[in-house]
Image: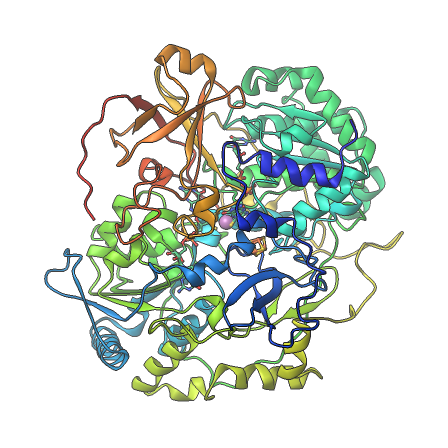
C-alpha cells in the first residue's frame, strides 16, 4: 500500500494506543490553519508567539475569541519550523496558560531547610531577600559560587543577570543530558555542531537511517513533516530500535537491535561500505583525513562479528549498508538528539558522523545542508566582569571536549563530597525540573541540601520547586515578551513572541524579575530598558523592521548571504577542524588519550529476572512539563510499561495489570504502572515514556499517574569526552505486591 502523508499523521495518532482521541485538542492537530477567523468578526484577535512546549520553538498565532478569552494556537504559515501546523503538544500549549495548578505568588520557605512548607510573600520581599542573599554569599565565597541551571527562552534573562554578577557557572539539561556528545562528535569530525533545528535535508533525502531517533513520537515538527513528505516521495527508511516504534512501521527495514550495541552495528556498516567500495571516493579523498587508518581499523568489525553482539543478521547488515550507498549522497544517518545513552556516546556519534562522511552526505542535497542564521545587533549593556573561575575549573581533568556548561559537573562542585576549591554555594534554577531531568536524583538532592540558598523560577509547582528557599512564579510564554527567536535554517529567519494576555495570578515575566534583582544589586545598567518590548523594537529597527511590523508578520525571513546551502560541484570547502578537513581519524581525541577512531565497548548486562529500562517520548507530551497540562492529560494521563509477551507469560501478567518496579540498586518505584503486553518490544528490555509519575500533590492531574523513569536511573555511565550522562544503564525487575511506600510530598 502506498504511504501517504495523511497516513503518517494517522499513524502517529494510532501510536497513541488506547488514548482517548475524541477531544477538542485533536481537532486542532489536523485543523486547517487557513481558516482565518479574523475575517468578518472584527473582535477576534491574533498575537504572534513561538511555542515553548518544546525547543523546536515553532512560530504561530495565539487567537483570542470575541470575549477576549484564549481560543487556540495555530502555526504560522511562513515559519520553517511549523509550516503553519503545530504538533499536538503545541496545540495543547494553551493548557499551560489555563492550568489552575500554576504557581500564583512568590513563595518563601518557612521552618527547617528540609521542610516543604512555604508562605506567600510580596515581589518586593522576594527581591530584597534574594539580593541580600546574593551579596552575602558573594562576599563569603565569591560571586562565582552562584550557579544557574536553565532551560528555555526566558533563561536568557537570568543568564544575563548571573553573568553581570560575575559568574559563568551556567548549564542546562539540553547539553549533558541531551545533545552534548552529539555536538562534540560532529565538531570533532566536521568542525561544527548541529545545533537546533538540525540541518537535515530530509525532504529531499532518498534514505533515512534512524538509530533510536523515534520521529513521530519525538514530534520535532519540521522533521516529522519533512519525513512525511519524503515518505510520499518513496524515501527508504531504516530504523534501528529495540522497540517497534511508530516510524519502524513506516520503514523498509526495522533492525530490532539488542540495546547498547549500536556501536558494533555502526562499525560493521563502515566495514561493508569501505570493503565493498561503496563510499564516495572523490569526496573522501578531497575532503577528509585518516581514511587509510579507518580502513585498517574496521577490518576486524565484520558483519559476522557484529551479528554476535547486535543480534542483527550479517546479510541484513550488508543489505542495509548497500541501501544507504544506493541513495548517497541523498542519505541521512540521523544523528539523533537525546544522545546520552551508554556513556560511550561521543564514540557512537563519531561513528555516525563518519558514516555520513563516507556516504558524502554532509553539504549535499538530501543529506546535511549548510544552515544560516539571521544576525541581530546586541542591545547595549556593559561588559560582564571576568569571573576568576568557571565550571570547567570545578574539575579541570574532566570532560576536555565539553563546550557548554555540564550540569553534573556543577552538581559535583555543589556536593558535600567535593574536595576542590571552586565550590558552588547557591543555585538559581529556571525552567528545568532537576530531580527529574538529571539522573541520580539522590546526588542532586544531596547537592541541593549543601547549598546556602536556592531560588527556583518556574510556572508550575513541579518537583524542583519543593527544594527552593524562594519560588518565583513566571508567567507562561503566552503572557510575556522574550527574545526574538533566532535559529538556523535553510533561510535565515526570526520569530517574535508577544504577550496575548496579562499574566494570570501574580505571575511575572523573567526579564522583569532579573531586572528588579539587578537594580537591588547595583547592576541596573545591564538592564537599561523599561519594558522588554523596548529592546525588541530597537533590535528590529536596526535590521529594517519594527515591533509593529513583526506583530503583523510573526516571522520574517531574510536572504542568505551566500548561495551555499550545499557544497558546489568541485568545491573544496574548509572545515572548522584542526586539519581543515573532515577528520575520520581524530588527532585531537588521541591527544587526550581517547580512541581516535570509534570503538565498541561491551556494556553491563541485566541479571536473570531483570530487564533493561529504556525510555522515550509520547507524541502528546514533553518531558515532565506537560504531564499536568489539562489539555494534554486528556489525551494521555499516564505512561504504561511495554513488556514482551514472552516475559509477560513468565510473570503471568495481564494487560493493564498494575505493578511496581525495582532497579538493580534496590530502588522501588514510588507509584505503580500498568503493563502493556506487546510484541513491539524485545524480551530483554522494558520501555516507558519519560516525564510521568509526578510526586508533588499540588499537581492535581499529574500526581501519582504512572512512573517516573528518573527515580529508577541510579546508575549513570558518564561519557568521558563530553560529560554526557548515559541513562540507559539501569535494569529493573517487577514487584507485583504493593510495596506500600509512603509518598512524601
Ligand atoms: N513528543 C515529544 N517530542 C520530543 C520531545 C518530547 O518531550 N516529546 N523532546 C524533544 C527532545 S529535547 C529530544 S532530545 C528528542 C529525543 O528524541 P530522540 O533523539 O529521537 O530520542 P532517543 O532517546 O534517541 O530515542 C528514543 C528511542 O530510542 C530507542 N532506544 C532505546 N535504547 C536503544 C538502543 O540501545 N539502541 C537504539 N538504536 N535505540 C534505542 C527507544 O526504544 C526509543 O524508541 O525528542 C524531542 N521531541
Ligand atoms: N530520565 C530521563 N531524563 C531525561 C530525559 C529522559 O528522557 N529521561 N530527557 C533528557 C532531555 S533530552 C532533556 S532535553 C531534558 C529536559 O529537561 P527539563 O527541561 O528539565 O524538562 P522538564 O521535565 O520539562 O522540566 C521543565 C521545567 O520547566 C518548567 N517550565 C516550563 N515552561 C516554563 C517557562 O516558561 N518558564 C519557567 N520559568 N519554567 C517553565 C516546568 O514547569 C518544569 O518544571 O531532560 C533530560 N533528562
Ligand atoms: S514541535 Fe510541537 S511542542 Fe515543539 S515547538 Fe513545535 S508545536 Fe511546540
Ligand atoms: Mo533533549
State the residue at coordinates (60%, 20%).
306
Q: Is residue 434 left or right of residue 592?
A: left
Residue 508, x across and y down, in percent? 38, 74
Q: Where, quadrant-wise, is the N terminus in this rendering?
A: top right
Return the residue nearer the eye: 10 or 166.
Answer: 10
Res 420 quadrant in image: bottom left
Residue 591 pos. (x, y %): 53, 46
Residue at point 47%, 85% (across, down): 531
Q: Residue furthest left?
A: 111
Regarding residue 733, the answer to whether it shows in the image is yes
Residue 370 pos. (x, y %): 74, 57
Image position, residue 16 (x, y; %):
53, 36
Q: Residue furthest right?
A: 569
User: Looking at the picture, does residue 588 appear above or below residue 42?
Assistant: above
- Is 573 drawn above or below residue 185 in the view shown? below
Report the label total: 0
Amino acid at each position: 500500500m502506498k504511504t501517504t502523508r495523511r497516513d503518517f499523521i494517522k499513524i502517529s495518532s494510532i501510536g497513541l494506543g488506547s488514548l482517548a482521541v475524541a477531544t477538542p485538542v485533536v481537532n486542532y492537530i489536523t485543523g486547517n490553519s487557513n481558516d482565518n477567523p479574523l475575517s468578518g468578526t472584527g473582535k477576534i484577535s491574533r498575537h504572534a508567539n513561538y511555542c515553548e512546549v518544546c525547543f523546536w520553538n515553532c512560530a504561530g498565532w495565539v487567537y483570542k475569541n470575541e470575549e477576549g478569552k484564549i481560543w487556540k494556537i495555530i502555526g504560522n504559515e511562513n515559519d520553517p519550523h511549523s509550516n503553519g501546523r503545530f504538533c499536538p503538544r503545541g496545540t495543547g500549549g494553551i493548557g499551560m496558560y489555563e492550568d489552575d495548578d500554576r504557581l500564583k505568588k512568590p513563595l518563601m520557605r518557612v521552618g527547617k531547610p528540609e521542610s516543604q512548607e512555604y508562605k506567600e510573600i510580596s515581589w518586593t520581599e522576594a527581591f530584597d531577600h534574594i539580593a541580600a542573599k546574593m551579596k552575602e554569599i558573594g562576599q563569603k565565597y565569591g560571586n562565582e559560587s552562584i550557579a544557574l541551571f536553565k532551560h528555555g527562552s526566558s533563561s536568557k534573562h537570568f543568564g544575563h543577570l548571573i553573568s553581570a554578577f560575575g559568574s559563568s557557572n551556567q548549564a542546562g539539561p539540553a547539553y549533558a543530558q541531551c545533545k552534548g556528545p552529539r555536538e562534540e562528535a560532529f565538531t570533532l569530525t566536521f568542525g561544527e555542531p548541529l545545533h537546533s533545528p538540525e540541518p537535515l535535508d530530509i525532504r529531499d533525502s532518498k534514505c533515512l537511517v534512524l538509530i533510536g531517533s523515534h520521529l513521530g513520537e519525538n514530534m520535532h515538527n519540521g522533521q516529522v513533516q519533512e519525513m512525511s513528505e519524503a515518505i510520499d516521495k518513496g524515501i527508504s527508511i531504516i530504523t534501528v530500535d529495540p522497540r517497534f516504534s511508530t516510524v519502524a512501521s513506516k520503514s523498509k527495514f526495522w533492525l530490532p537491535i539488542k540495546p547498547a550495541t549500536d556501536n558494533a552495528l555502526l562499525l560493521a556498516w563502515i566495514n561493508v561500505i569501505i570493503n565493498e567500495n561503496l563510499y564516495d571516493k572523490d569526496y573522501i579523498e578531497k575532503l577528509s583525513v585518516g581514511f587509510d587508518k579507518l580502513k585498517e581499523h574496521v577490518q576486524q568489525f565484520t558483519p559476522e562479528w557484529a551479528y554476535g553482539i547486535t543480534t542483527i543478521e550479517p546479510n541484513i547488515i550488508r543489505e542495509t549498508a548497500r541501501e544507504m550507498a544506493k541513495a548517497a549522497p541523498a542519505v541521512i544517518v540521523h544523528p539523533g538528539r537525546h544522545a546520552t545513552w551508554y556513556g560511550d556516546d561521543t564514540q557512537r556519534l563519531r561513528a555516525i558522523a563518519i558514516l555520513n562522511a563516507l556516504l558524502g552526505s554532509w553539504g549535499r542535497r538530501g543529506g546535511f545542508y549548510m544552515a544560516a542564521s539571521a544576525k541581530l545587533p546586541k542591545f547595549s549593556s556593559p561588559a560582564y566582569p571576568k569571573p576568576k573561575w568557571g565550571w570547567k575549573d570545578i574539575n579541570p581533568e574532566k570532560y576536555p571536549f565539553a563546550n557548554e556548561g555540564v550540569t553534573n559537573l556543577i552538581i559535583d562542585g555543589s556536593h558535600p563530597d567535593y574536595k576542590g576549591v571552586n565550590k558552588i554555594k547557591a543555585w538559581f534554577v529556571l525552567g528545568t525540573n532537576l530531580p527529574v531531568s538529571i539522573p541520580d536524583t539522590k546526588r542532586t538532592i544531596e547537592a541541593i541540601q549543601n547549598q546556602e540558598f536556592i531560588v527556583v523560577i518556574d510556572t508550575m509547582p513541579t518537583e524542583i520547586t519543593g527544594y527552593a528557599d524562594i519560588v518565583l512564579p513566571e508567567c507562561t510564554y503566552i503572557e510575556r515578551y522574550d527574545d526574538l527567536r533566532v535559529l538556523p535554517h535553510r533561510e535565515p529567519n526570526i520569530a517574535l513572541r508577544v504577550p496575548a494576555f496579562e499574566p494570570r495570578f501574580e505571575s511575572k515575566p523573567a526579564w522583569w524579575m532579573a531586572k528588579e534583582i539587578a537594580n537591588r544589586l547595583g547592576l541596573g545598567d545591564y538592564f537599561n530598558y523599561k519594558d522588554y518590548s523596548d529592546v525588541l523594537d530597537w533590535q528590529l529597527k536596526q535590521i529594517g523592521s519594527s515591533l509593529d511590523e513583526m506583530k503583523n508578520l510573526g516571522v520574517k525571513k531574510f536572504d542568505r548571504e551566500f548561495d551555499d546551502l550545499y557544497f558546489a560541484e568541485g568545491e573544496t570547502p574548509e572545515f572548522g577542524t584542526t586539519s581543515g578537513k573532515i577528520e575520520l581519524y581524530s588527532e585531537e581525541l588521541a591527544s587526550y588519550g581517547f580512541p581516535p577512531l570509534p570503538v565498541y565497548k561491551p556494556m553491563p548486562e541485566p541479571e536473570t529476572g531483570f530487564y533493561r529500562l529504556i525510555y522515550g517520548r509520547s507524541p502528546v507530551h514533553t518531558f515532565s512539563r506537560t504531564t499536568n497540562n489539562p489539555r494534554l492529560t486528556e489525551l494521555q494521563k499516564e505512561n504504561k510499561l511495554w513488556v514482551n509477551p514472552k516475559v509477560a507469560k513468565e510473570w503471568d501478567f495481564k494487560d493493564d495489570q498494575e505493578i511496581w518496579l525495582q532497579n538493580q540498586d534496590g530502588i522501588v518505584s514510588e507509584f505503580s504502572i500498568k503493563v502493556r503486553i506487546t510484541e513491539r518490544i524485545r524480551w530483554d528490555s522494558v520501555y516507558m515514556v519519560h516525564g510521568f509519575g509526578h510526586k508533588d500533590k499540588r499537581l492535581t492531574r499529574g500526581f501519582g499517574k504512572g512512573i517516573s523513569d528518573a527515580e529508577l536511573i541510579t546508575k549513570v555511565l558518564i561519557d568521558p569526552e563530553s560529560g554526557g550522562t548515559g541513562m540507559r544503564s539501569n535494569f529493573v525487575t517487577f514487584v507485583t505486591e504493593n510495596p506500600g511506600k509512603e509518598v512524601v510530598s
